[in-house]
Amino acid sequence: MSGINYSEKIPNNVNLSEDRTLQRALEHWQPNYLQWWNDMGPDGSQNFDVYLRTAVSVDPQGWAQFGHVKMPDYRWGIFLNPGEQDRKIHFGDHIGEAAWQDVPGEHRANLRRIIVTQGDTEPASVEQQRHLGLTAPSQYDLRNLFQVNVEEGRHLWAMVYLLHKYFGKDGREEAEGLLERNSGNADNPRILQAFNEKTPDWLSFFMFTYFTDRDGKFQLCALAESAFDPLARTTKFMLTEEAHHMFVGESGVSRTIQRTVDVMNQLKTDDVAKLRAAGVIDLPTIQRYINFHFSVTIDLFGADQSSNAATFYSSGLKGRYEEGKRTDDHVLKGNSYKILSVEDGKLVEKEVPMLNALNEVLRDDYITDSKGGIERWNRVIEKAGIPFKLTAPHKAFHRNIGSLSGAKITPEGRVVSEAEWNAKVGEWLPTNEDRAYVASLMGRVVEPGKFANWIAPPVMGINRQPVDFDYVRFN
Ligand SMILES: [Fe+2]
Ligand SMILES: [Fe+2]
């Protein structure tokens, strides 16, 4: 691998060609990455030419260059947003001090853990999605899947860059570990549970990119505030790409709903059996998928009370969502926050120190943001004149972390007995039958401009190309 032209092979704005140590680390890691992409990346896609955007710089002209490329030849670049002159730490105990250009010894272990946890989610989602290309509902959707996949690969590169550049031998070992853990692997799973779940069908994929990539957005926003400047600058650039992932999810669910309500109106029915016979996904099933992905995703924010969250904030490693726009003292000592727990069979609010509740603060910001898309989905249903409303489940529903873990609570927020939960859970979460039905709809549609029966075409194509553009050349 020596003699490789890094500026060409790995577009970057970190002076890669002048940093021998970093180059050597990457020379060692890159072939392992490609091997991982071959083994665990998009199934059967190695020879396709895909209409992808590639980032070759961070400016408006460079961050999204479109063209057909073979995915193993995708140029996974390393980009940091430009540094801010004299940037100061703007929250926590070090507020007002200069931001760190290197890792302070006392925060090394925590920063490494934060970067590894973020980095682990990126290849995990590629693994979760690796078989979806075989059942893509259109070329347009197939291209969007692959775009998300290569960018999650780039996000892995972004975290590996930080590990190699700032964490020495430990960092190199962690970078190897990121390729060794695998989603759902019994012996060596990914770190966070939602990233070990299957993404078995395209409705799950759209829900995942709407809800779970949005978790990514909130984590990245919190890290974009970090006192560790290279982490802040890296995550800021990752956020520009994340927007497309959430668009894929939101528009994918929206088009699924569009097709369903069109058929409901054609057949003048809301009968689930009739709609399934017509090959579309009934709205109650879509609601159950929302309930599942919403609840699994909000667990990703961690326990509602966490001393780690307090430490990460006070030491300046991880801020709040839009920290800079908030008007409090950005130190938060003595502030409190309300969290939920179950007492005597009822959900009750209790006040706890805000510093310990910062996971909950971020979760609540996430919940507000994620409800916006559900409202936009409802407008599709409303426009079709159908009296049905999708909702986000209560945040206590189906939780597996923190004080609500394992509590039996309905999507409306009512505490119920184990017996009632077991009797009704099939109305609240996707059943095996729902999943089998959705799976039965998944078939590969590859002609340009054609779409599977269960989903409506998009309003417009990618990068102002027509909807029937040849987004993927199969060769
Ligand atoms: Fe990502
Ligand atoms: Fe993403």
Image (spheres, rainbow, N blue to C red):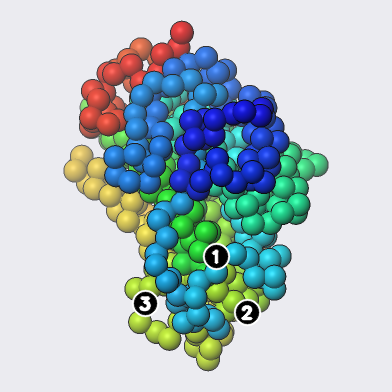
Q: Which mark is on residue 289?
A: none
Q: Secondary structure at mark 1?
A: loop
Residue 241 rendering spot, x and y as whole percentages: 41, 44
Left or right of 106 on screen, residue 342: left
Task: Judge the density around disc 3: few (<14), some (14-19), many (≥20) Cα neighbours within 10 Å.
Answer: few
Which one is nearer the viewer's eye here, 351 or 449?
A: 449
* Residue named by callout 3: 326
Judged from this view, the residue extending furthest toward the front is 18
Residue 196 rendering spot, x and y as whole percentages: 65, 44
Q: State which quadrant residue 53 falls in.
A: top left
Type of amino acid at the residue the image marks with label 1: Gln
Of circles 2 and 1, the one toward us is 1
Indicate whether 427 appears above or below 129: below
* Residue named by callout 1: 101
Q: Which mark is on residue 344?
A: 2
Task: Judge the density around disc 2: few (<14), some (14-19), many (≥20) Cα neighbours within 10 Å.
Answer: few
Q: Residue at x 58, y 22 (%)?
A: 43
Which one is nearer the viewer's eye here, 136 or 245?
A: 245
Left or right of 383 on screen, residue 445: right
Which one is nearer the viewer's eye here, 22 or 371?
A: 22
User: N-terminal of the two: label 2 or label 3?
Assistant: 3
Q: Residue at x 20, y 39 (%)?
A: 384
Q: Secondary structure at mark 3?
A: loop
Type of amino acid at the residue the image marks with label 3: Arg
Q: CA distance from mark 2 to mark 3?
A: 36 Å
Indicate whether 86 appears above or below 431: below
Q: Residue at x 34, y 32 (%)?
A: 65
In this rendering, the count of numbered labels is: 3
Residue 318 in sight from this viewpoint: no
Q: Secondary structure at mark 2?
A: loop
Q: CA distance from mark 3 to mark 1?
A: 25 Å
